[in-house]
Amino acid sequence: MSIKIDFNNMMSENIPQGITDAELTKTAAIANKAKAAVDSSRGLNMLGWTELPYNQTAVVKDINEYVKQIEDFCEYFVVLGIGGSALGAVALYNALKHTYYNELPKAKRKHPRFYCIDDADPERLNALFDIIEPQKTVFNVITKSGATSETMSQYLIVSDYLEQKLGANASKHIVATTSENSGNLIKIAKEKGYKTFFIPSSVGGRFSVLSPVGLLPAAAIGIDIAALLNGAKDMDRICQNSDFKNNPALICATLMYLAYQNGANISVMMPYSYGLKTVSDWYCQLWGESLGKAVNRLGEKINVGQTPVKALGVTDQHSQIQLYVEGPSDKVVTFIRVEKFRSEVTIPNGCEAYPDVNFLCGHSLGELTNVEQAATEYALKKAGKMNYTITLNTIDEYNLGSLLYFFQMQTAYIGEFFNINAYNQPGVEEGKNAAYALLGRHGYENKASEISQSGKDIKYIIEI
Ligand code: PA5
């Protein structure tokens, strides 16, 4: 495995607010208990994600066969989904494909263009209709519940559009990824004859990137999904180490937990690679939705959770970093650094008469990026702000599978530290239910009257 995690700047030797060795040793018992809890639930309840690297041989075969079937006509592969049903596929696409993949000519691209609509913005969907050709498009509708308003609305619009354009052939252009035995989408898919892939009931949205939710779109655009799963498998094996200091996800969960106890209630994810920018979006959902909880398993009100924030190196060095270095000590910054970029650019000579510019010449952009990461890490350390750095040798399927699995395991362990259910999302459900009520869905009448009673006071509204 070619991933390195450096947590020197989480420790009190380097950062006064940091964690002492004594604190780490004292927390070992809690860490071991967290690991035992995760271990004993592997594959059970909502921990089906732990088994995805191992139990999908048939699924991978089915996905690859389906991708072959659509290959001769599919020029546009469009994901319709939201939250955990979209963020993983987008992260894989951006990390593993050419930065301007969709703009490449077919001979270089080799696979369909990729789009994801993960909202209900009418302009965005209409804009998509402006650029696709229906007879060359496959829409992958992804929803585990088969009930999410945004996704089901997109589905209704798209199926109507396809039926109008393609008539009886429309069903070949929709593939559904959903629950095998519950929800409406599976019933609709059977009625209409769509190809289907299943999300195991024990895998929640934000832990589903390595299920068909992420694997099908990835395979459709030529990503090696077996290598992704191999990376996850190897990370899982390493995370089975019961010495918590040698279990990367467990030690990092412990550090984050202790940092949170010391007042770091914000987790900044800052990759120094444009390709990894949307891995931060994926991480923010995983961290925020899993760990932001009002009550623990005993029903006690605890209102825990670190607020995840995304930043991008080097871009955000010229915006957010000022706050991170000089603002409150309420954050842990996680840097992701890439040792070897997949392509390089050397900064040419040409400014010999200007020493203040000339010093850049001869260096590469990758070098500049990594020097800036090291410099920012140093500035944070000097200011006494906690941070740690994950270094990937390079960005490829194997390393990305390992990285995503690492974050999932770290999240699961922290959930145990807090003694919370990391797999539910009552706060999200509340909003989803309120939207159903406001749209007049049958069965939500009480919610509708509850909402109308909590009406807004006109005196606090300014209309200009
Ligand atoms: O992590 C989660 O569970 C959520 O973000 C869901 O993925 C999101 O709400 C979409 O749900 P569904 O797949 O049921 O449409």
Image (cartoon, rainbow, N blue to C red):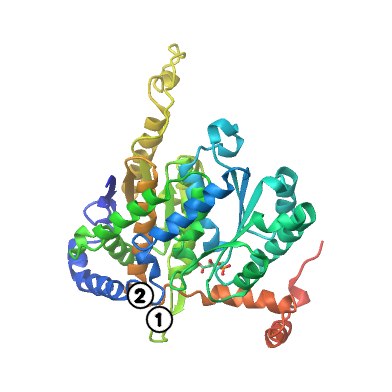
Quadrant of ligand 1: it is bottom right
The quadrant holding residue 411 is bottom left
Amino acid type, label 1: Asn
**What percent of the width, then of the height, locates residue 199?**
49, 67
Q: Secondary structure at mark 2?
A: helix
Q: Are marks 1 and 2 in contact (CB under 8 Å)?
A: yes
Q: Residue furthest top?
A: 353
The type of residue carrying mark 2 is Phe
Q: Number of labelled discs?
A: 2
Q: Secondary structure at mark 1?
A: loop
Residue 27, by quadrant, is bottom left
Q: Residue at x 35, y 49 (%)?
A: 383
Residue 418 is labelled as: 2
Q: Which mark is residue 37?
A: none
Position of residue 204 in the picture relative to residue 73 (left or right): left
Sequence-wise, which precedes: disc 1 or disc 2?
A: 1
Q: Residues within 10 Å of mark 2 (few under 14, many from 20)?
A: some
Q: In this rendering, would 104 be left or right of 366?
A: right
| Image coordinates for residue 41, horizontal then vertical, percent | 32, 75
Considering depth in this image, is 107 or 353 the residue closer to the camera? Answer: 107
Q: x and y percent of residue 122 in the render?
A: 74, 56
Furthest residue toward right: 464
> Measuring 59% from the left and 34% from the top, which residue is drawn there?
106
Whether residue 463 is situated above or below residue 454 in the rendered picture: above
Q: Does residue 71 appear to the left or right of 266 in the view shown?
A: right
What is the distance, in whole Å, between disc 1 and disc 2 at their CAs? 7 Å
Quarter of the image with the C terminus in it: bottom right
Residue 296 got which mark? 1
Residue drawn at (54%, 62%) of the image: 85
Inspect this view and state whether residue 312 appears. Answer: no
Kindly tell me whether residue 67 is visible in this rendering. Answer: yes
Q: Is mark 2 within 8 Å of ligand 1?
A: no
